[in-house]
């Protein structure tokens, strides 16, 4: 095992293997952390990791995976940008007897086309964020603006669903506006500016719910630019728990986040190692934790701890 993963991995089954990793891109701080953790773990385990950045495009991912199959890699990691459209290429990998492990997002494809999927429960993440807001506002009326993740991705679909479940039955909380910010800081800022303009210069907004921290950080900037106080005038709740949201919390500008570990590769490598050793079939869905953090949880300490891990 490496310092970056809590699971134990039998290294001898992985040493010397070539593994392809089709990564979505580098749209968020969380994804950059996942990439760096995966590369560090591969190195510590003696894996030759072939890394392909798809620049957010599914067609690039499909091309990269076909390339890995043609090269005859031993296994493939894929973080699938959207949920649909994977069946053909996953079938090709299966026919080539190359195990595929999904990281951090799901696919709409038969489960026998991949060895395992390591991800969080994204409906739960949305629910945890929504339940936090329900408690926070009590009986007060609250217009929420929502910054959605990438259209068609499982985290965008499921984080919306979970949040809506949590606020259902609380008529005082309403999602007033909802649009995609594509999981990026720049888009989060841009869409938040538009939300503010159409909401009485922000006076009619009580909270922003962002499907990831990067969009929340962009929204915080837009709130400040409008002369309002993020965290106070407009509450900020998001998902990922990257260092920058803890910095915002320490400054009183963000109110809550839900942790998503960037260590998806650790459990995937452990599953692959056991599978290659004696054919042990791993759990089809390995679910990571979804813990809520607020400014009461030592944000400066959480910031420092993550920076120390190289995130
Ligand atoms: O929350 C976000 C990102 O797929 C669950 O992708 C992941 C999400 C993560 O870029 O920051």
Image (cartoon, rainbow, N blue to C red):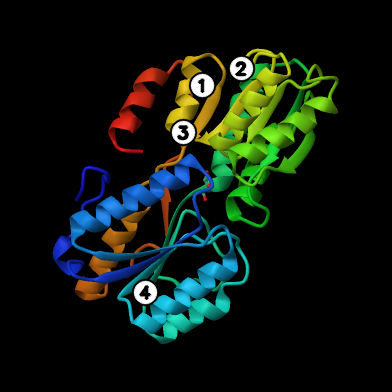
Q: Which residue is mark 4?
A: 99
> Could you tell whether 74 is left or right of 30 in the image?
left
Mark 2 neighbour class, 10 Å CA radius: few under 14, some 14 to 19, many 20 or more: many
- Element class at badge 2: loop
In contact (CB < 8 Å): disc 1 and disc 4: no
- Element class at badge 3: loop
Q: Which residue is outermost to the bottom?
A: 95
The numbered dot on residue 231 is 2
N-terminal of the pair, mark 1 or mark 4, is 4
Q: Is mark 1 within 8 Å of ligand 1?
A: no
Residue drawn at 47 percent across, 53 percent down: 104
N-terminal of the pair, mark 3 or mark 4, is 4
Residue drawn at 60 percent across, 60 percent down: 82
Q: How far is disc 3 from disc 2 in space, using C-alphas?
A: 16 Å
**How far across and how far down the image is residue 63, in percent?**
51, 74
Q: How far is disc 2 from disc 1 in space, using C-alphas?
A: 9 Å
**How far across and how far down the image is residue 260, in percent?**
45, 41
Q: Which residue is mark 1?
A: 248
In contact (CB < 8 Å): disc 2 and disc 1: yes
């Amino acid at each position: 095992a490496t310092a970056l993963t809590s699971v134990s991995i039998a290294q001898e089954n992985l040493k010397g293997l070539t593994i392809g990793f089709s990564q979505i891109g580098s749209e968020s701080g969380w994804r950059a952390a996942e990439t760096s953790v995966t590369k560090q773990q591969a190195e510590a385990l003696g894996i030759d990791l072939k890394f392909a950045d798809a620049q957010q495009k599914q067609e690039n991912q499909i091309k990269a995976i076909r390339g890995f199959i043609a090269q005859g890699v031993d296994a493939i990691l894929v973080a699938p940008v959207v949920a649909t459209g994977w069946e053909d290429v996953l079938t090709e990998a299966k026919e080539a007897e190359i195990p595929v492990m999904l990281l951090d997002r799901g696919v709409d494809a038969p489960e026998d086309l991949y060895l395992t999927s390591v991800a969080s429960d994204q409906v739960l993440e949305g629910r945890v964020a929504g339940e936090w807001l329900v408690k926070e506002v009590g009986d007060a009326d609250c217009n929420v603006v929502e910054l959605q993740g990438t259209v068609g991705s499982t985290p965008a679909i499921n984080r919306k669903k979970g949040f809506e479940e949590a606020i259902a039955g609380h008529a005082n909380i309403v999602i007033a506006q909802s649009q995609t910010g594509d999981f990026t800081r720049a888009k989060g800022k841009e869409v938040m500016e538009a939300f503010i303009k159409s909401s009485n210069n922000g006076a009619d907004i009580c909270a922003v719910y962002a499907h990831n921290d990067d969009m929340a950080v962009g929204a915080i900037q837009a709130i400040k630019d409008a002369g309002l106080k993020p965290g106070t005038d407009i509450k900020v709740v998001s998902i990922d728990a990257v260092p920058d949201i803890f910095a915002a919390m320490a400054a009183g500008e963000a109110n809550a986040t839900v942790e998503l570990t960037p260590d998806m590769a650790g459990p995937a490598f452990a599953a692959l190692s056991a599978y290659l050793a004696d054919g042990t079939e791993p759990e089809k869905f390995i679910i990571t934790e979804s813990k809520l953090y607020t400014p009461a949880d030592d944000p400066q300490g959480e910031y420092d701890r993550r920076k120390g891990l190289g995130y």
